[in-house]
Image (cartoon, rainbow, N blue to C red):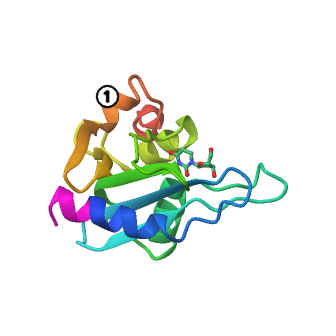
Amino acid sequence: MDKRELVRSALKAREMAYTPYSHFKVGAALLGKNGVVYQGCNIENAAYTPTNCAERTAFFKAVSEGQYEFSAIAIVGGAEDAKELSVCAPCGVCRQVMIEFCNPDTFEIILGTSTEDYQVYTLKELLPLGFGPANLRK
Ligand code: THU
Protein backbone atom coordinates (compact mmCIF):
# COMPACT_ATOMS: atom_id res chain seq x y z
CA MET A 1 0.00 0.00 0.00
CA ASP A 2 1.70 3.21 -1.11
CA LYS A 3 0.98 6.65 0.30
CA ARG A 4 -1.09 7.72 -2.70
CA GLU A 5 -3.39 4.75 -2.24
CA LEU A 6 -3.78 5.52 1.45
CA VAL A 7 -4.73 9.14 0.66
CA ARG A 8 -7.21 7.86 -1.92
CA SER A 9 -8.77 5.66 0.76
CA ALA A 10 -9.00 8.65 3.16
CA LEU A 11 -10.75 10.70 0.45
CA LYS A 12 -13.25 7.86 0.04
CA ALA A 13 -13.79 7.64 3.81
CA ARG A 14 -14.45 11.39 3.92
CA GLU A 15 -17.56 10.87 1.79
CA MET A 16 -19.21 9.20 4.79
CA ALA A 17 -18.54 12.07 7.25
CA TYR A 18 -21.62 12.93 9.32
CA THR A 19 -21.29 16.67 9.83
CA PRO A 20 -24.66 18.46 10.12
CA TYR A 21 -23.17 21.05 12.53
CA SER A 22 -19.69 22.02 11.33
CA HIS A 23 -20.09 20.96 7.67
CA PHE A 24 -16.36 20.18 7.92
CA LYS A 25 -15.70 16.72 6.55
CA VAL A 26 -12.68 14.63 7.47
CA GLY A 27 -11.58 11.20 6.26
CA ALA A 28 -8.85 8.93 7.57
CA ALA A 29 -7.28 5.70 6.35
CA LEU A 30 -5.25 3.80 8.93
CA LEU A 31 -2.84 1.12 7.74
CA GLY A 32 -2.49 -1.80 10.11
CA LYS A 33 0.70 -3.85 10.19
CA ASN A 34 -1.56 -6.71 9.10
CA GLY A 35 -1.97 -4.89 5.75
CA VAL A 36 -5.62 -3.99 6.36
CA VAL A 37 -6.77 -0.37 5.88
CA TYR A 38 -9.28 0.88 8.45
CA GLN A 39 -11.28 3.85 7.22
CA GLY A 40 -12.81 6.49 9.48
CA CYS A 41 -14.85 9.67 9.18
CA ASN A 42 -15.89 12.30 11.67
CA ILE A 43 -19.26 11.69 13.31
CA GLU A 44 -20.89 14.71 14.92
CA ASN A 45 -23.59 14.91 17.55
CA ALA A 46 -26.30 17.41 18.52
CA ALA A 47 -24.75 17.56 22.00
CA TYR A 48 -21.42 18.48 20.30
CA THR A 49 -18.97 16.87 22.76
CA PRO A 50 -19.72 13.26 21.76
CA THR A 51 -18.37 14.11 18.30
CA ASN A 52 -15.71 11.65 17.15
CA CYS A 53 -12.90 12.66 14.82
CA ALA A 54 -12.17 10.66 11.69
CA GLU A 55 -8.82 9.50 13.02
CA ARG A 56 -10.26 8.10 16.23
CA THR A 57 -13.08 6.42 14.34
CA ALA A 58 -10.43 4.58 12.31
CA PHE A 59 -8.37 3.62 15.39
CA PHE A 60 -11.38 2.44 17.37
CA LYS A 61 -12.67 0.38 14.47
CA ALA A 62 -9.28 -1.33 14.17
CA VAL A 63 -8.75 -1.93 17.88
CA SER A 64 -12.30 -3.21 18.28
CA GLU A 65 -11.46 -5.78 15.62
CA GLY A 66 -8.27 -6.89 17.38
CA GLN A 67 -5.64 -4.89 15.46
CA TYR A 68 -3.23 -2.97 17.71
CA GLU A 69 -0.23 -2.31 15.46
CA PHE A 70 -0.11 0.36 12.78
CA SER A 71 2.36 1.82 10.33
CA ALA A 72 0.65 4.93 8.89
CA ILE A 73 -2.49 7.04 8.68
CA ALA A 74 -3.63 9.32 5.86
CA ILE A 75 -5.88 12.25 6.77
CA VAL A 76 -7.84 14.60 4.51
CA GLY A 77 -10.30 17.28 5.53
CA GLY A 78 -12.05 20.45 4.55
CA ALA A 79 -15.34 22.29 4.46
CA GLU A 80 -18.01 20.34 2.61
CA ASP A 81 -18.29 23.04 -0.06
CA ALA A 82 -14.53 23.58 -0.43
CA LYS A 83 -13.37 23.40 -4.04
CA GLU A 84 -9.90 22.35 -2.93
CA LEU A 85 -8.78 20.79 0.32
CA SER A 86 -6.10 22.26 2.51
CA VAL A 87 -3.96 20.34 4.98
CA CYS A 88 -5.96 19.04 7.96
CA ALA A 89 -3.71 18.20 10.91
CA PRO A 90 -4.98 15.85 13.63
CA CYS A 91 -6.27 17.39 16.85
CA GLY A 92 -4.45 16.89 20.15
CA VAL A 93 -6.84 14.20 21.37
CA CYS A 94 -6.26 12.14 18.23
CA ARG A 95 -2.49 12.52 18.58
CA GLN A 96 -2.82 11.15 22.12
CA VAL A 97 -4.78 8.14 20.83
CA MET A 98 -2.07 7.57 18.23
CA ILE A 99 0.73 7.45 20.83
CA GLU A 100 -1.20 4.79 22.73
CA PHE A 101 -0.81 2.37 19.83
CA CYS A 102 1.99 3.66 17.61
CA ASN A 103 5.75 4.04 17.76
CA PRO A 104 6.34 7.82 17.68
CA ASP A 105 9.63 7.39 15.78
CA THR A 106 8.20 5.36 12.92
CA PHE A 107 4.44 5.92 12.68
CA GLU A 108 3.77 8.09 9.62
CA ILE A 109 1.04 10.71 9.46
CA ILE A 110 0.21 11.61 5.88
CA LEU A 111 -1.63 14.90 5.48
CA GLY A 112 -3.13 15.04 2.03
CA THR A 113 -5.00 17.53 -0.08
CA SER A 114 -5.14 15.14 -3.05
CA THR A 115 -3.53 11.89 -4.14
CA GLU A 116 -0.84 14.02 -5.80
CA ASP A 117 -0.19 16.35 -2.88
CA TYR A 118 0.60 15.26 0.65
CA GLN A 119 3.06 15.89 3.48
CA VAL A 120 4.47 13.16 5.70
CA TYR A 121 5.33 13.55 9.39
CA THR A 122 6.27 11.11 12.10
CA LEU A 123 4.09 11.02 15.21
CA LYS A 124 7.10 12.31 17.16
CA GLU A 125 7.19 15.43 14.98
CA LEU A 126 3.51 16.17 15.65
CA LEU A 127 3.59 15.12 19.31
CA PRO A 128 7.02 15.92 20.74
CA LEU A 129 7.63 14.75 24.31
CA GLY A 130 4.33 12.88 24.21
CA PHE A 131 3.14 10.82 27.15
CA GLY A 132 2.42 7.23 26.19
CA PRO A 133 2.58 3.64 27.42
CA ALA A 134 6.41 3.75 27.42
CA ASN A 135 6.29 6.33 30.22
CA LEU A 136 4.52 3.85 32.49
CA ARG A 137 7.09 1.11 31.95
CA LYS A 138 9.96 0.75 34.44
N1 THU B 1 -12.11 16.82 12.95
C1 THU B 1 -11.63 15.58 12.62
O1 THU B 1 -12.41 14.66 12.37
N2 THU B 1 -10.29 15.40 12.57
C2 THU B 1 -9.37 16.39 12.67
O2 THU B 1 -8.20 16.14 12.50
C3 THU B 1 -9.81 17.76 12.97
C4 THU B 1 -11.24 17.93 13.29
C5 THU B 1 -13.56 17.04 12.94
C6 THU B 1 -14.24 17.19 14.26
C7 THU B 1 -15.48 17.96 13.87
O3 THU B 1 -16.46 17.05 13.42
C8 THU B 1 -15.03 18.80 12.69
O4 THU B 1 -13.85 18.20 12.21
C9 THU B 1 -14.78 20.25 13.03
O5 THU B 1 -13.92 20.37 14.10
**Which of these two is toward me, 35 or 8?**
8
Looking at the figure, which quarter contains the N terminus?
Answer: bottom left
The residue that label 1 is drawn on is 125
Residue, far left: 2
Dot 1, crowdedness within 10 Å: few (<14), some or many (≥20)?
A: some
Q: Is residue 4 magenta?
A: yes
Q: Is residue 120 above or below residue 34?
A: above
Q: Position of residue 31 (x, y in %)?
A: 29, 63
Residue, far top: 129
Q: Is residue 6 above or below residue 96?
A: below
Q: What amino acid is at disc 1? A: Glu
Q: Residue at x 53, y 38 (%)?
A: 91
Side of 42 relative to 63 (left or right) = right
Looking at the figure, which quarter contains the C terminus?
Answer: top left
Identify the secondary structure beneath mark 1: helix
Residue 68 visible (yes or no): no
Q: Is residue 70 above or below residue 89?
A: below
Q: Residue 9, located in which quarter of the rendered image?
A: bottom left
Q: Is residue 36 magenta?
A: no
The magenta-colored residue range is 1-6
- Under 8 Å from ligand 1: the CB of mark 1? no
**Which of these two is toward me, 111 or 15?**
15
Q: Position of residue 35 (x, y in %)?
A: 23, 72
Q: Position of residue 8 (x, y in %)?
A: 29, 65
Q: Residue at x 29, y 74 (%)?
A: 36
Q: Residue at x 52, y 45 (%)?
A: 94
Residue 111 visible (yes or no): yes
Question: Would you say the magenta stretch is mainly helix, strand or loop?
Answer: helix
**Which of these two is toward me, 137 or 57?**
57
Q: Residue at x 64, y 54 (%)?
A: 23
Side of 35 relative to 89 (left or right) = left
